[in-house]
Amino acid sequence: MSDAPRPHLPPRHVLERIVQLALEEDLGRGDLTTEATVPPETMGAAAFNAREPLVFSGLAVIAEVFRQVDPSLVVTAQRTDGEPLAKGDTACVVRGSAASILRGERVALNFVQRMSGVATQARRYVDALPEGSRTRIADTRKTTPGLRALERYAVRCGGAHNHREDLSSAVLIKDNHIAAAGGVAAAIERARAYAPHTTRIECEVDTMVQLQVALDAGADVIMLDNFGDDAVRDAITLVAGRCLLEASGGITLARVHALGTLGVDVISVGALTHSAPAVDLGLDWSDA
């Protein structure tokens, strides 16, 4: 993964807000069970342990959850984000007030199981590329509402790349834009006139005819929507390096190797986020 992106955390205020909303949702007016059963002076420690092989992501989120629950809690990392964990490996340990640990347990697990699931899914797709491939695996905007910043970070932890951050970050002309604008050429022409000169224009196409029109109109990136492998090969031959080509549309893990072998520049995969299963990563209790 020589082209692997360097993961960078979301801005601090974004992380704080996401965690705050999750804690408010879960705690309500208080943790009735913990308040009823655990003496406030009881101290404890709990370890986040992998119960299956996975790629870990979410250390900073775990720390932020417990910081907001109780700033006196101490989270000690034993692994870093993006690191593979075997079954039984410990990612980190939290120590301090037992009641505080219990209050933050479920929220912390929800985040880390989700983020590590996305990172693990991304790593599967990256590893499916042929060795030495320059093709990039990228995510999409098909993310969980409110969690995009964390899921995009998890994608990078898995070694894949991010596509557009949001609608303001790039021009990507899709099928409905084309229909509303009156065609591929018209949409690209209007985008070129409107967007800053430093902005790439990407256009989605679903036929070879549209591909030729987009190429002639000067698209910088062309997204091949639901093209089969033979059609992708024909598209690469037609374009001949004049723009970047992105394969997209229901791409399964089984197709990645073939597309990477063909030499498409980018493979965008909604399944990195919308279909990533949560991993089995648990919090195991011990005495402090």
Image (cartoon, rainbow, N blue to C red):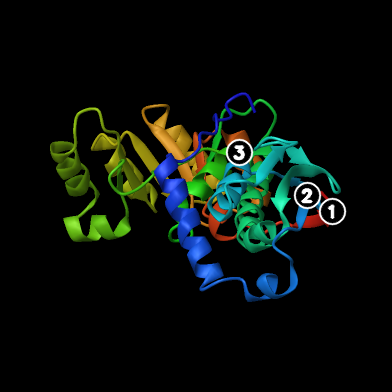
* Image location of residue 128, percent across then percent down: 69, 41
Crowding near the residue tagged with mark 3, few <14, some 14–19, many ≥20 C-alpha atoms within 10 Å: many
- Mark count: 3
Residue that badge 2 annotates: 47
Q: Please give the name of the residue rendered at 55% of the width and 47% of the height, measured from the top-left corner.
A: 64
Q: Position of residue 193 (x, y in %)?
A: 13, 37
Residue that appears at 52% across and 37% down = 161
**Residue assigned mark 3:** 157
Amino acid carrying label 1: it is: Ser
| Marks 1 and 3, the one that precedes in the sequence | 3
Kindly check if marks 2 and 1 are in contact, taking CB atoms under 8 A apart as contact: yes
Q: Identify residue type, mark 3.
A: Cys
- In the depicted structure, whether residue 157 falls above or below residue 177: above
User: With respect to residue 133, does 93 lie above or below?
Assistant: below
Q: Which residue is mark 1?
A: 286
Q: Nearer the viewer, residue 106 or 211?
A: 106
Question: Callout 2: few (<14), some (14-19), or many (20+) C-alpha neighbours within 10 Å?
Answer: many
What separation in Å lies between label 3 and label 2 (alpha carbons)?
21 Å
What is the three-letter code of the residue carrying label 2? Ala
Depth check, mark 2 against mark 1: the one in front is: 1
Using residue 24 as the reference point, say whether residue 66 is left or right of it.
Answer: right
| CB-based contact (under 8 Å), mark 1 and mark 3 | no
Q: Is residue 140 visible?
A: no
Left or right position of 197 against 176: left
Foreground residue, 225 or 41?
41
